[in-house]
Amino acid sequence: MVNTRPPKIDELLKIDPYLHDFQDEISRRYGVFLDYQHRIDECGGMEAFTTSYKEFGLNVQPDNSVKGLEWAPAAEKLALIGDFNNWDQNANVYKKEEHGKWSLTVPASSDGSCAIPHNSVIKIAVSRNGQTHFKLSPWATYVTCPNPKETVIYHQNFWNPSEKYQLKEKRPARPASLRIYEAHVGISSYEGKINTYRAFADDVLPRIKNQGYNAIQLMAVMEHVYYASFGYQVSNFFAVSSRCGTPEDLKYLVDKAHSMGIFMLLDVVHSHASKNVEDGLNQWDGSNGGYFHDNARGFHNLWDSRLFDYTQIETLRFLLSNVRWWVEEYGFDGFRFDGVTSMIYHSHGMNDSFSGGYPMYFGLNADTDSLVYLMLANDFLHKKYPFMVTIAEEVSGMPGICRPVEEGGQGFDYRLAMALPDMWIKILKHTSDEDWKINDIVFNLENRRYAEKHVAYAESHDQALVGDKTIAFWLMDKEMYDFMSTDSPLTPIIERGLSLHKLIRLITLGLGGEAWLNFIGNEFGHPEWLDFPRVGNGESFHYARRQFNLVDAEYLRYKFLNNWDREMMQLEERTGFLHKGYAYTSWKHDGDKVVVFERGGLVFVINLHPNKSFADYSIGVNNSGSYHIALNSDDAKFGGHSRVNNDTKFHTFDDGYAGRRHRLQVYIPCRSAIVLEKDEE
């Protein structure tokens, strides 16, 4: 195949001159991308290709007959079985077609009704080498576990309700600044249970809206048999997680979010799949191949899961149709792609230090097949849906991940700033407050690829899992059990914890990226950790819930952190500083532990010192005039000591300071922060 130069590669080279030496490899990848687009065109074009869910699986026709189509190249016989035909393997046998496909028609009943009752159990009997296994269609839209106490095997349910929920709310506009609330429906109740889509919509959505978030990243929606996998061991890619409700319930949730102006992102897992054979995609046609590599490349040893063969045209059909399905059927507005680093390297990033520089990104370890799949997915999604937002979970720093495909990039809008939560946990675990290296903290917060947008966060679900704990619990630990009441003494540990929780989130929000992410409950300093019901904990739900009752209790100090988070989000909503360019850091002093930076017309002054307060502290600003306090972490409503008067006016001096044209003097107490905003003239 001839190398093909991306039409806008000069833009990429202008942004990152180091890529000049790797133009040939970038062009080669782009050529492979064009080759796959050509193959898709030969299959009827991208429009038909990405709506293959209208043909594959089981689809009810206008006359109530049911047409079935499957790709099972290694199978010798397929038969549709279920309650509707008394599980007779000879009653509804698929016809073998070309290219490994199998077709079927189930005529309507004599009274004109569908012969397969709604919600009845069905399976596909797949025969190979004299053995028959009852399998679930890869395109199944609803699967359930009929009796979890007796079996963990899921069954396919024929979903064909007489009345389907129709999405009616208009999609919100794509936010200029994304303030993302990462949420898991199952754990979203304070009760020890699996919560539902409808309860989340009615009870949790109003909280998120009130808190100032404009986007939700919904986890664990794609069906996963193992609840404790957090949704990352997907077994059924077109099915909603039935433990939280039905397909219609999920539509209700998305529709209600849209009515509140909330942008909906789905956590999509196309990096790997569950190894389940009975109810998953693994060995669907009786072989180890099919949608997966039929060799060592098809297995992820660390995750104990299967890996897709992105060179298979039917794998591309399945996955590209899958992303379109979630947009068209459920109204999602974008995706967070899980496990991108694992996808784009043959080593899956395992034991990689990612210190090899540019030769590492464009060497033999880079997985062209996966990179090209991501290019195909992003190119299609952004051309088809102008509102689309895609986010890559990518930690290696691969250049171009968040640049357009026509430049030679992979086409994502954002990547997660995954190094930031790791930095904070490492500091809290291993460094005393007096030894915090302010220059290192600022460097890590600002260290990201130029012109590639990042989602900043101090902690996500990863940091809360059993074996680790939330930032609040790292800071305050067991004292949260006894001293979070406003009637109890404000102990030094609680005082420190409340202060640093606020400051860590503020400096990360201000310096760490072009979007923000918060994991459900962390906005109010959720205690402890996450642990799903399992044999090892007696199937307990105690740690698989979000204790909103804590923040609702007026006598508890959780409300202070919640208030702070809400006003941070509201300040960003009003000023839009996340999308108004990079911050300019004029001051980072290791001795004083003070950081000063300007962004979006705001001046952030953060004092991380454990015991030193500074009066008349000089800071540099670029714009002259008078300033007022827009946010003050020491305010009593945030659990502070009210050492700073919120009505204070700050006037610039013309002598300049810290490389800026003007100077201000501020009072900044220890472990506190103020955000200044210029008065309107």
Image (tube, rainbow, N blue to C red):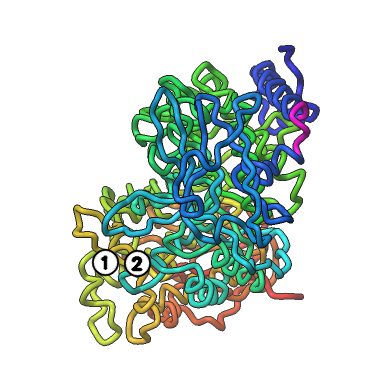
Q: Is residue 22 above or below residue 317?
A: above
**Image coordinates for residue 679, horizontal then vertical, percent:** 69, 75
Q: Which mark is residue 545?
A: 2
Quadrant (top left, top right, bottom left, bottom right) of the C terminus = bottom right
Asked if residue 565 lies left or right of residue 626, the reply is left
Cα separation between marks 2 and 1: 7 Å
Q: Residue at x 76, y 51 (%)?
A: 386
Q: Residue at x 70, y 70 (%)?
A: 625
Closer to the camera in the image, 680 or 287: 287
Q: Quadrant of residue 95?
A: top right
Closer to the camera in the image, 240 or 277: 277
Residue extent of the magenta highlight? 41-46
Q: To which residue does mark 1 refer?
A: 542
**Image coordinates for residue 491, horizontal then vertical, percent:** 23, 75
Q: Are marks 2 and 1 in contact (CB under 8 Å)?
A: yes
Quadrant (top left, top right, bottom left, bottom right) of the N terminus = top right
| The residue positioned farthest toward the top in the image shown | 2
Asked if residue 94 lies left or right of residue 496, the reply is right
Q: Residue at x 45, y 22 (%)?
A: 297
| The residue positioned farthest toward the right in the image shown | 7
Closer to the camera in the image, 658 or 481: 481
Q: Hey, what amino acid is under mark 2?
A: Arg
Q: Hey, what amino acid is under mark 1?
A: His
Q: Is residue 646 above or below residue 281?
A: below
Q: Residue at x 68, y 66 (%)?
A: 167
Please give the count of numbered marks on the rendered protein: 2
Q: Quadrant of residue 191?
A: bottom left
Q: Which mark is residue 120?
A: none
Closer to the camera in the image, 395 or 334: 334
